[in-house]
Image (cartoon, helix red, strand yellow):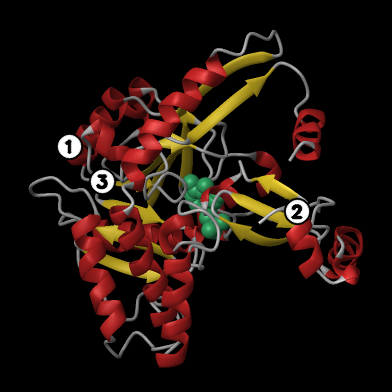
Amino acid sequence: MTAVDLATRVPADTASAPLAAIERRHGMGFVPKRDVALVRGAGARVWDADGVEYLDLTSAHGVAALGHAHPRVADAVAAQARALVSCQDAFPNDVRAAYLSRLARFLPGEPGRELDRVFLCNSGAEAVEAALKLARLSTGRTRVLAARGAFHGRTMGSLSATWRKEYREGVEPLVPHFEHVAFNDAGALDAALTREHAAVLLEVVQGEGGVHAASADYLRRAREMCDERGALLILDEVQTGFGRTGRRFAYERRGVAPDLLCMGKAIAGGVPMGGVAAGPRVAPPRPGSHGSTFGGNPLACAAALATLDVVEAEGLVERSDRLGASWLEDLRAIDSRAVREVRGEGLMIAMELRARVAPVLDALARRG
Ligand code: PLP
């Protein structure tokens, strides 16, 4: 649909400026608001309240792996909303059971490291919280090693593993027994990891930290050290999962399977959902030690099931690998002193500039 078509469908009083004013006035203000109010999306495009069309290079923070408003997801959500929206965890449900078994088949494992038990929740941070609790429950240990530059969420547990000071300031003390070591440095991990650690928690490609990828060798060494010292390896693929990096999960490219895998963002085609999958080294938790009212609700499960259908039917993992490689090549061909580095994996791509980035982003937005 062109901007003109859309403009005729948007009532005059929904232009961006007043919407931004309302959100600035009545939102909590944790996130500074842009002036563009988004009201519709289709595929890789979004439209603002003034009918202007944009190519969405943000992927809605890594959520829109299928693009926006995929019709298969929309249909699945609408049908499920008429059947059953909510179903507490104590009662099995047809859609949840179908999704759990489908997801278990989708998750790349290795012999002896199958990720075939999943706790479903509602966000990436919740997935990290659940993984941390499972690690402590399973090992009976408390210490957790995370990486410098890491981002794992902003709830108190996940924030304890998040690196940046700005996120932590003013809300400390956080959960004790969390430490940070240099990322992608096996020597640093070796020196820090003890037999008292419950877990090593890592992103395979640090997202918020600037798209920095762990090497296969580093992850393999981390895997070996965790096995040796009785710690669990938790991989946070909230941002990198479901094809973003040109593999189902970024660990697949490195041939290293985790004990606990955190998922979120793209998992349900834009509907809020998170999940943590566990391998055989993770002991079954004590009943009641964790839970979530909305976790695994049939509405989100229907969206997630449709998402896996689309990922597989449309070959989106391979597409991400292919398109990512050509984007990287084209971006690297830009001959400009302003560009410090272009890096990435699949369609998770960063361009680091020497100059301030905000004016560049504004200029890009003005050109759609
Ligand atoms: N883990 C990683 C790697 C993330 O990138 C994020 C969000 O950006 C999170 C966890 C937290 O996810 P959520 O914002 O859904 O709580």
Q: Which amino acid is tagged 1?
A: Glu
Q: Residues within 10 Å of mark 2 (few under 14, many from 20)?
A: some
Which one is in front, 222 or 107? 107
Cα gap from disc 3 to disc 2, whole angstroms: 46 Å
| Rendered image: mark on residue 258 | 3
| Rendered image: mark on residue 3 | 2
Per the image, label 2 sits on a secondary structure element best described as helix
| Rendered image: mark on residue 228 | 1
Q: In this view, does 365 lie above or below 236?
A: above
Quadrant containing the C terminus in the rendered view: top right
Residue at 41% over, 84% down: 80
Residue at 26% over, 41% down: 195
Comparing labels 1 and 3, the label whose residue is closer to the camera: 3
Comparing labels 3 and 2, the label whose residue is closer to the camera: 2
Residue at 46% over, 36% down: 347
Q: Estimate the x, y position of residue 283 in percent, counting from the top left.
A: 19, 63
Q: Quadrant of residue 194?
A: top left
Q: From where the camera sits, is residue 5 visible?
A: yes
Quadrant containing the N terminus in the rendered view: bottom right
